[in-house]
Amino acid sequence: MTQNQPPQPARSKITVLYIDDDPQNRTLVNRLLTSYGYKILEAANGLDGLAVAQQIQPDLILMDINMPGLDGHETTTRMRGIPALTHTPIVAVTARITRGERELALASGCDGYIPKPIDIDTFPNLIASYLHGYRDNLPPDVHRQYLGQYSQKLVERLEGKIVELETAHKKLQKIDKIKSDFITLAAHELRTPITLIYGFARLLQLRAGTNGADPTAEGGLVDLSGRIFNSVDRLNATVNDILNIALVEADEMRLSREPVSLGQIIMAAMKELNPAKNNRILTIGYEGLDTLPAIIGDASRLQLAFWNLFSNAVKYTEDGGSVFVKGRVVDTPPAIPASALPPAPIKRGGVLVSVKDSGIGINPADHQQIFERFYVVADTAYHSSSKTAFGGGGMGLGLAITRGIINAHGGAVWVNPQTSPGSTFDVFLPLGDPH
Ligand code: ADP
């Protein structure tokens, strides 16, 4: 092949993947090789390059070496471990031209080495020769020597990254603690004045009702005091959520232990939520709740846990949909995802309650994360804090508190992966005293 007769690819669409973090380099190589009939794919870093290479399996890969993240050597070594790419020609295209750089590139797994800046007259010929099977090689002893050097470099990089990660992790833990402490402190400080405002607002509301004020007049005393009371009630619930999650996190949720009728608790939670009163049109059904045996637990906390599940089922189900609760006794514990398990192993049977709705459903990728505190799926910019309105959202604490309560009872709560359309939350609670 001569410089004047640049090679034409044998088939019209030979695919070349060019991995380089410099967009100008990519543009130059792209224009040049495209004019010779090649199809060029680009990636701006090693990880993206790996993903493209695995998906497309190009005929040739051009690899920049100096890149942030995985560098060209590491990306090449990684590619060599992927069966589909073991024999793909990989050519280093690099500004690293000092002594030993070619050897290092070949030791890492490259088949060739083209120094930058590229010579646009000879570059297409070189590409064609690699495509036709040319491979640059090192004598075995040189190869061994540079492989040793390369392994050393890899271990040093790994060590540096581990130190970096550990430092970042410690910093994050510290920030997380400061944040948690602040939230708990703020919630504690808010609690006393809110309790007072709550009491006085209720008093005002009752007085207004008995003082002959028109209860139907918009902007009248009854109306206004009612609005104050409702707002404080919501604020109160929010502060309680924050204090509850603080208890869950500190593992300090002290439970009372008494025989509890789950059926009654579940019905009470639904009655308290009362979606119909808030103009929601939903079909609500129950099955098997009256015959559930008593479990040992904390009635008010369990009621809160089921209230959260109902509130979500109602919030995320359109009018015309349904919420269905089914309870049954299971002799052996069901299959529970590892992330949902309580600290102590579940060894015996218990009660399994499923809260199923026909609503918008939950993306399987979010099934675990929604139980993390402050995790909300929807964009918080469109946030509304209603407990019953369709699409209303909270702070992303409800499920974290629910899991904390259920785990503290030695049980588990998780999203049933088989539900669609809609969602089903399964709750397992062991029979007998969990402690
Ligand atoms: P919040 O208090 O904001 O409702 P949760 O912890 O209760 O937070 O829920 C976290 C997220 O899980 C919600 O933002 C919602 O996207 C999703 N989610 C919970 N329950 C359901 C459900 N029944 N249907 C659809 N999405 C749900």
Image (spheres, rainbow, N blue to C red):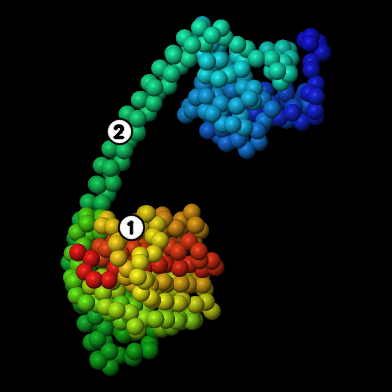
Q: Would you identify the image quadrant in which residue 222 lies?
A: bottom left
* Local SS, label 2: helix
Q: Answer with the quarter of the image where residue 121 lies.
A: top right
Give, as a three-letter code, the residue at label 2: Thr
Residue 393 in the image: above or below residue 116:
below
Label of residue 21 in the image: none
Residue under pointer 2: 167
Gap between marks 2 and 1, in whole Å?
Answer: 30 Å
Question: Do the residues under discs 2 and 1 have CB atoms within 8 angstroms?
Answer: no
Residue 176 visible in image: yes
The residue positioned 36% from the left and 71% from the top of the image is 330
Q: Which mark is residue 341?
A: 1
For the residue carrying disc 1, how many other residues have a C-alpha within 10 Å: few (<14), some (14-19), or many (20+)? Answer: some
Q: Residue at x 26, y 78 (%)?
A: 294
Query: Residue 36 falls in which quadrant of the image?
Result: top right
Picture residue at 66% right of the left edge, 36% below the top = 56
The x, y position of residue 90, in whole percent, is 62, 22
Q: Quadrant of the C terminus?
A: bottom left
Instruction: Tell me if residue 428 comes above or below residue 381 in the rendering.
Output: below
Task: Give the foreground label among 2 and 1.
Answer: 1
How many numbered discs sit on the rendered protein? Answer: 2
**Residue 228 seen by the camera:** no
Local crowd size for mark 2, using a 10 Å CA cut-off: few (<14), some (14–19), many (≥20):
few
Q: Position of residue 220 (x, y in %)?
A: 34, 84
Q: Residue at x 49, y 28 (%)?
A: 70
Q: On the rendered structure, is 335 left or right of 77?
A: left
233 vs 292, nearest the viewer: 292
Please tell me whether mark 1 sits on a helix, a strand or a loop.
loop
Residue at the outermost bottom position: 212
Location of residue 116 in the rendering, given as x and y in whole percent from the top left corner: 60, 14
Amino acid beneath label 1: Leu
